[in-house]
Image (cartoon, helix red, strand yellow):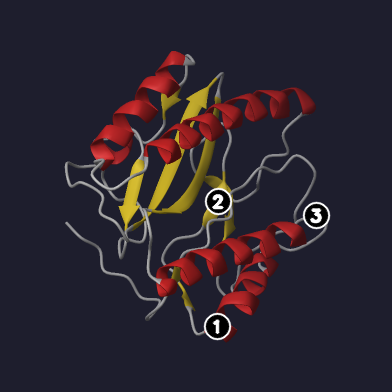
């Protein structure tokens, strides 16, 4: 279905509750972040917290995904699988948390610096964050979804970065991924206007090199 659902005030209350679980889970992962910690340890802590809240980690077994969150380190753009590699000083890591409770999903992610990172890594994370904030500030009823990508590109492209096109933001609610589509690049062809009751993610993925991606096995 290409039409985003307009959630009722009662549904929004439930969505807020599950979003708060995701927020607290990501904070738990963030606190653990340090050189020597493995992404598998972070995944275990995130899983245990989500389950303790009578919620379910949405990524677990989603298209056979084997873990409860995504941990994308350095050049891994998204959907990295937690493993036994210890994080190292200078890494950057995106932690992507989704969970499900009372009929609704939440989905959020943040990128963190592990210890002291290079100036180029710090600048990339900061520019991506600022582009997200610019895009969020644009969101209001009546604005077009395609405009989010223009706001993101307006900030990062003058800095010499490129915007990944292969993955995009999306509606989230009763389904993990639903309408609308929210591309992050300039002059995209996303359809639709924002309306009260729409719930969606904006997830700009910004590269220091080309925007194209390689899919690993």
Between 12 and 195, the residue placed more toward the observer is 12
Number of the front mark, 1 or 3:
1
Horizontal and vertical percent position of residue 119: 43, 73
Q: Residue at x 41, y 69 (%)?
A: 121
Tell which circle, 3 or 2, labels the residue nearer the N-terminal end. 3
The answer to whether residue 192 is seen in the rendering is yes
Q: Residue at x 65, y 48 (%)?
A: 3
Number of the front mark, 1 or 2:
1
Q: Secondary structure at mark 3?
A: loop
Horizontal and vertical percent position of residue 132: 61, 61
Tell which circle, 1 or 3, labels the residue nearer the N-terminal end. 3
Between 165 and 193, the residue placed more toward the observer is 165
Q: Which residue is mark 1?
A: 159
Q: Which residue is mark 3?
A: 140
Look at the picture and state if 181 lies above or below 189: above
Horizontal and vertical percent position of residue 110: 49, 50
Q: Which residue is mark 2?
A: 170
């Amino acid at each position: 279905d290409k039409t985003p659902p307009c959630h009722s005030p009662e549904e929004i209350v439930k969505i807020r509750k599950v979003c708060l679980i995701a927020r607290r889970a990501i904070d738990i992962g963030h606190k653990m972040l340090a050189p020597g910690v493995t992404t598998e340890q972070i995944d275990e802590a995130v899983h245990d917290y989500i389950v303790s809240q009578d919620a379910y980690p949405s990524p677990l077994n989603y298209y056979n995904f084997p873990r409860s969150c995504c941990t994308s380190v350095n050049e891994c753009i998204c959907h990295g699988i937690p493993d036994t590699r210890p994080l190292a000083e200078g890494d950057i890591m995106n932690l992507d948390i989704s969970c499900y409770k009372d009929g609704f999903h939440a989905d959020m992610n943040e990128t963190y610096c592990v210890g002291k990172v290079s100036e180029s890594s710090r600048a990339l994370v900061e520019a991506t964050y600022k582009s997200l904030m610019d895009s969020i500030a644009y969101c209001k009823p009546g604005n077009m979804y395609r405009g989010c990508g223009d706001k993101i590109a307006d900030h990062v492209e003058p800095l010499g970065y490129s915007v990944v096109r292969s993955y995009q933001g999306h509606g989230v609610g009763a389904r993990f991924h639903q309408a609308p589509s929210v591309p992050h690049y300039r002059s995209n062809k996303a359809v639709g206007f924002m309306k009260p009751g729409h719930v969606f993610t904006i997830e700009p993925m910004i590269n220091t090199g080309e925007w194209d991606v390689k899919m690993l096995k």
